[in-house]
Image: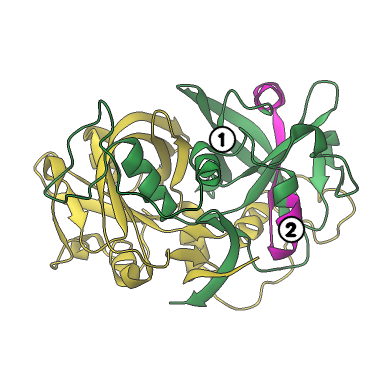
Chain colours: A green, B yellow
Amino acid sequence: MVTEERDATRMNDQQDTSSPQPPPAPVAGGVPPLEDDPNAPTDLAAFKHAFRRHASGVAVITSTRGDGTPVGFTATSLASLSAVPPLATFNMARSASTWPAIAENDRVIIHMLGRRNRAVAEKLSGPNADRFVGDHWHRGPHGLPVLNNVTSWVVGRIIERFPVHNNAVVVVQIEGGGMGEDDEALLYHERAYRVPGDRV
Amino acid sequence: MVTEERDATRMNDQQDTSSPQPPPAPVAGGVPPLEDDPNAPTDLAAFKHAFRRHASGVAVITSTRGDGTPVGFTATSLASLSAVPPLATFNMARSASTWPAIAENDRVIIHMLGRRNRAVAEKLSGPNADRFVGDHWHRGPHGLPVLNNVTSWVVGRIIERFPVHNNAVVVVQIEGGGMGEDDEALLYHERAYRVPGDRV
């Protein structure tokens, strides 16, 4: 259901079983537990435990290959970088099937998803061949795929692709966009889609 | 209440009034509205409108200056990059008061916050001089400030600082960490702290 385009933690989250967590085991080659907390995990375990306690907004990034084929994926790594100029970042694996398009095409569409878009979030994190089968999208600026009925979308120009190991941090300068009906923002947390709840 | 350390969108969000949004005005030098949506905002307006519809988890990044002085800020840009090796990213302005420490010190602590940590999220996004006044933190690994009673924290080594205009994307490799009592994850959305609500 979830493919390599999802950023790695989330993908791993979803690949985990939903059974209760065993105590973290020492990680081979990891550093010793920090301080005197007997439950302190190390390295990968620390990373996984921490991100399991972090909630994320859900976005979909789309682009096209050289021949116009639409590509895209559901991302939980979208973040703002600056307002002036308007910049955002997202992270991905360079082994992802969407990467060749992101590496070549200078433009992408970034979609913000609401509660009503849960099915499209799942579709765009499902099998590649199925992601653009259906009437849930249309061609927008630069011929890029724009998902229908999202809460907001922006078109942006990729200004940096920073490689880090087999991943990339992609920096996008926003050029314009469109808005849809408002909705509760879609979240991903603890292997489930959620919407924001109480103000605290 | 919110300083330059907050990533730019969120800072701008909080600086906005909470009055209803006027229709987006054309942005000087911006591209024309896309497609035939009369409400399509452009450039900065598109960016702001879109990120207003995106929810984020809340984290706190801390480090120390060369003389050991603790520094830190509340971040809504934390994202995972890969699980193997365990990598995360966060974004910040290089004009931020915390930047000199992030530029020099190779290590940071990243804290995941829960509902019970709302006050510390506000404190670490408040006036610089007040952020470490109090008993809400202690010295952890490498003498770095660790906030008390968070849901999880990790210590990481900064492996990249990618400059983008007057900002930076910071890449951290996680080395270990500690866990606290679980809690509902703290979110920031629509200028308010929230916790996750319904599964959808």
Quarter of the image for residue B93 reads top left
Which amino acid type corresponds to the residue marked 1 in the rendered image? Val
Question: What x and y, as percent, mark residue A53?
Answer: 41, 56
**B184 left or right of A39?**
right
Which amino acid type corresponds to the residue marked 2 in the rendered image? Asn
**Given this view, does label 1 or label 2 mark the residue nearer the observer?**
2
Q: Secondary structure at mark 1?
A: strand
Compared with B177, B46 (above or below) is below
Q: Secondary structure at mark 2?
A: helix
* Letter of the chain that mark 1 sits on in the rendering: A
Residue contact at pointers 1 and 2, CB within 8 angstroms:
no
Question: What x and y, as percent, mark residue A76?
Answer: 56, 47
Q: Nearer the viewer, residue B173 or B67?
A: B173
Question: What x and y, as percent, mark residue B22?
Answer: 70, 71
Question: What x and y, as percent, mark residue B100?
Answer: 25, 40
Residue that appears at 69% across and 56% down: A113
**Where does label 1 land, which residue?**
A171
